Amino acid sequence: MLFNSIEYLVFLPLVFIGYWILKDSYKKQNILLLISSYVFYGWWDYRFLSLIIFSSFLDYYVGQKIEDAISEKHKKTGY
């Protein structure tokens, strides 16, 4: 999906409206944006979608581990 395509002109308002409908819940908004990102990138070439999904889950896991670290020193160094 290109930014100057008809599909994008339909896709963007749908995501934008959905985002504002879910304004009461940041978690639901983030899930909508995540799924929308997967759809957007998957539209271009679905074969690369697995890389983006893997990367997002890995980043989420590492972020959780950093948040769960005991001290500031551990958070910065990762040990």
Image (spheres, rainbow, N blue to C red):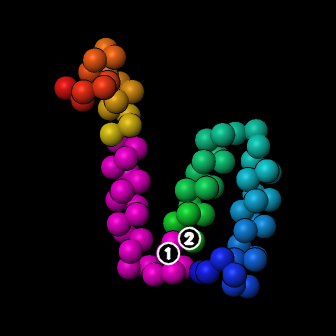
The residue at 66%/48% (across/down) is 29
To which residue does mark 1 refer?
42
Left or right of residue 58, residue 15 in this image: right
Give the farthest residue toward the bottom: 6
Q: What element carries label 2?
A: helix
Q: Is residue 4 highlighted in magenta? A: no
Q: Which amino acid does label 1 sit on?
A: Gly
- Give, as a three-letter code, the residue at label 2: Val
Query: Are the residues tagged 1 and 2 within 8 Å (C-beta)?
Result: yes
Q: Which numbered disc covers residue 39? A: 2
Separation of disc 1 and disc 2 at Cα?
5 Å
The answer to whether any part of residue 70 appears in the image is no
Indicate left or right for 3 with 23 as reference.
left
Q: Give the range drawn in magenta.
A: 41-61
Q: Is residue 49 magenta?
A: yes
Crowding around mark 1 (Cα neighbors within 10 Å: few <14, some 14 to 19, many 20+) is: some
State left or right for residue 18 relative to residue 42. Answer: right
Q: What residue is at 61 percent from the left and 41 percent from the top?
A: 27
72 to 66, vertically: above or below: above
Give x and y (percent) for residue 23. 76, 43
